[in-house]
Amino acid sequence: MRKSIVFISLLLFSCSSVFAANVFVGQIEKIDSTAKTILVKTQDGTEHTFHLVQRTAIQGGEATSSTAKDSFHGLKEGAQVAVHFTAKGKDETAEEIDHLSG
Protein backbone atom coordinates (compact mmCIF):
# COMPACT_ATOMS: atom_id res chain seq x y z
CA MET A 1 0.00 0.00 0.00
CA ARG A 2 2.77 2.42 0.92
CA LYS A 3 4.58 1.77 -2.37
CA SER A 4 1.37 2.60 -4.23
CA ILE A 5 1.02 5.93 -2.45
CA VAL A 6 4.65 6.84 -3.16
CA PHE A 7 4.27 5.83 -6.82
CA ILE A 8 1.06 7.85 -7.26
CA SER A 9 2.63 10.87 -5.54
CA LEU A 10 5.67 10.73 -7.83
CA LEU A 11 3.45 10.31 -10.87
CA LEU A 12 1.33 13.34 -9.95
CA PHE A 13 4.42 15.43 -9.24
CA SER A 14 6.02 14.53 -12.59
CA CYS A 15 2.80 15.29 -14.48
CA SER A 16 2.40 18.67 -12.83
CA SER A 17 5.98 19.65 -13.65
CA VAL A 18 5.49 18.74 -17.32
CA PHE A 19 2.61 21.20 -17.64
CA ALA A 20 4.06 23.93 -15.40
CA ALA A 21 4.51 27.24 -17.17
CA ASN A 22 7.59 29.40 -16.79
CA VAL A 23 7.45 33.19 -16.55
CA PHE A 24 9.77 35.59 -18.35
CA VAL A 25 9.57 39.39 -17.87
CA GLY A 26 11.09 41.78 -20.38
CA GLN A 27 10.64 44.17 -23.28
CA ILE A 28 9.34 43.23 -26.71
CA GLU A 29 12.17 43.86 -29.16
CA LYS A 30 10.60 42.45 -32.32
CA ILE A 31 7.20 41.24 -33.48
CA ASP A 32 6.90 38.95 -36.49
CA SER A 33 3.19 38.67 -37.29
CA THR A 34 3.88 36.38 -40.27
CA ALA A 35 5.79 33.82 -38.18
CA LYS A 36 3.55 34.59 -35.17
CA THR A 37 6.50 35.15 -32.85
CA ILE A 38 7.75 37.84 -30.50
CA LEU A 39 11.31 38.43 -29.33
CA VAL A 40 11.49 39.46 -25.67
CA LYS A 41 14.66 40.78 -23.97
CA THR A 42 15.31 41.17 -20.23
CA GLN A 43 17.40 43.87 -18.58
CA ASP A 44 20.37 41.47 -18.38
CA GLY A 45 20.25 41.00 -22.18
CA THR A 46 18.77 37.51 -22.30
CA GLU A 47 16.53 37.07 -25.36
CA HIS A 48 13.75 34.57 -25.98
CA THR A 49 11.60 34.04 -29.04
CA PHE A 50 8.07 32.99 -28.15
CA HIS A 51 5.59 31.39 -30.53
CA LEU A 52 2.05 32.77 -30.35
CA VAL A 53 -0.68 30.20 -30.89
CA GLN A 54 -4.46 30.42 -31.06
CA ARG A 55 -4.79 29.65 -27.34
CA THR A 56 -2.31 32.38 -26.30
CA ALA A 57 -4.14 34.78 -23.97
CA ILE A 58 -3.06 38.41 -24.09
CA GLN A 59 -4.00 40.40 -20.99
CA GLY A 60 -4.01 44.19 -20.90
CA GLY A 61 -3.33 44.75 -24.60
CA GLU A 62 -5.34 47.38 -26.40
CA ALA A 63 -6.26 45.66 -29.64
CA THR A 64 -8.85 47.53 -31.69
CA SER A 65 -10.22 47.25 -35.20
CA SER A 66 -7.69 49.90 -36.21
CA THR A 67 -4.69 48.26 -34.54
CA ALA A 68 -1.47 49.99 -35.57
CA LYS A 69 0.72 48.40 -38.22
CA ASP A 70 3.58 47.95 -35.70
CA SER A 71 1.44 45.99 -33.23
CA PHE A 72 0.19 42.42 -33.08
CA HIS A 73 -2.90 41.54 -31.03
CA GLY A 74 -2.45 44.73 -29.04
CA LEU A 75 1.27 44.13 -28.41
CA LYS A 76 3.83 46.70 -29.54
CA GLU A 77 7.58 46.73 -29.82
CA GLY A 78 9.04 48.38 -26.73
CA ALA A 79 6.22 47.19 -24.45
CA GLN A 80 7.07 45.59 -21.09
CA VAL A 81 5.46 42.16 -20.76
CA ALA A 82 5.37 39.07 -18.59
CA VAL A 83 5.23 35.94 -20.73
CA HIS A 84 3.93 32.70 -19.21
CA PHE A 85 5.25 29.96 -21.46
CA THR A 86 5.84 26.27 -21.91
CA ALA A 87 8.97 24.86 -23.49
CA LYS A 88 9.42 21.74 -25.54
CA GLY A 89 13.07 21.43 -26.42
CA LYS A 90 14.13 24.83 -27.74
CA ASP A 91 10.61 25.82 -28.80
CA GLU A 92 8.92 28.19 -26.37
CA THR A 93 5.17 28.75 -26.69
CA ALA A 94 3.50 31.72 -25.05
CA GLU A 95 0.47 30.55 -23.10
CA GLU A 96 -0.34 33.98 -21.64
CA ILE A 97 1.15 37.44 -22.09
CA ASP A 98 0.53 40.14 -19.49
CA HIS A 99 1.00 43.67 -20.87
CA LEU A 100 2.79 45.59 -18.10
CA SER A 101 3.52 48.97 -19.74
CA GLY A 102 4.43 50.74 -22.95
Image: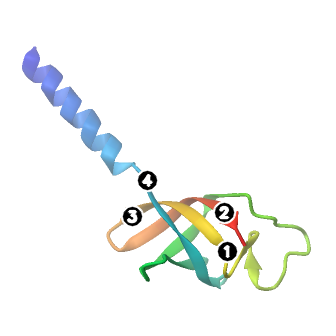
Q: Mark 4 or mark 1: which is in front? A: 1
Question: What residue is shown with label 3?
Answer: 87
SS under mark 4: loop
Residue at 67% in and 74% down: 79
Name the residue type under label 2: Leu
Q: Is residue 40 visible?
A: yes
Please tell me whether residue 46 is drawn above or below residue 62 in the rendered image: below
Name the residue type under label 3: Ala
Q: Mark 4 or mark 3: which is in front? A: 4
Q: Mark 2 or mark 4: which is in front? A: 2
Question: What residue is shown with label 4?
Answer: 21
Give the alpha-carbon distance from disc 3 to disc 1, as whole Å.
23 Å
Question: What residue is shown with label 2?
Answer: 100
Cβ–Cβ below 8 Å for labels 3 and 2?
A: no
Label of residue 60 in the image: none
Report crowding for label 3: few under 14, some 14 to 19, many 20 or more residues within 10 A (C-alpha). some
Give the alpha-carbon distance from disc 4 to disc 1, as whole Å.
21 Å
SS under mark 2: strand
Work out whether mark 3 precedes mark 1 in sequence or the reverse, and give the earlier one: 1
Cβ–Cβ below 8 Å for labels 2 and 1?
A: yes
Give the alpha-carbon distance from disc 4 to disc 3, as whole Å.
8 Å
Residue at 84% in and 81% down: 68
Label of residue 79 in the image: 1
SS under mark 3: strand
Name the residue type under label 1: Ala
Work out whether mark 2 precedes mark 1 in sequence or the reverse, and give the earlier one: 1
Where's residue 57, x and y in %?
65, 56
Nearer to the camera, 56 or 48: 48
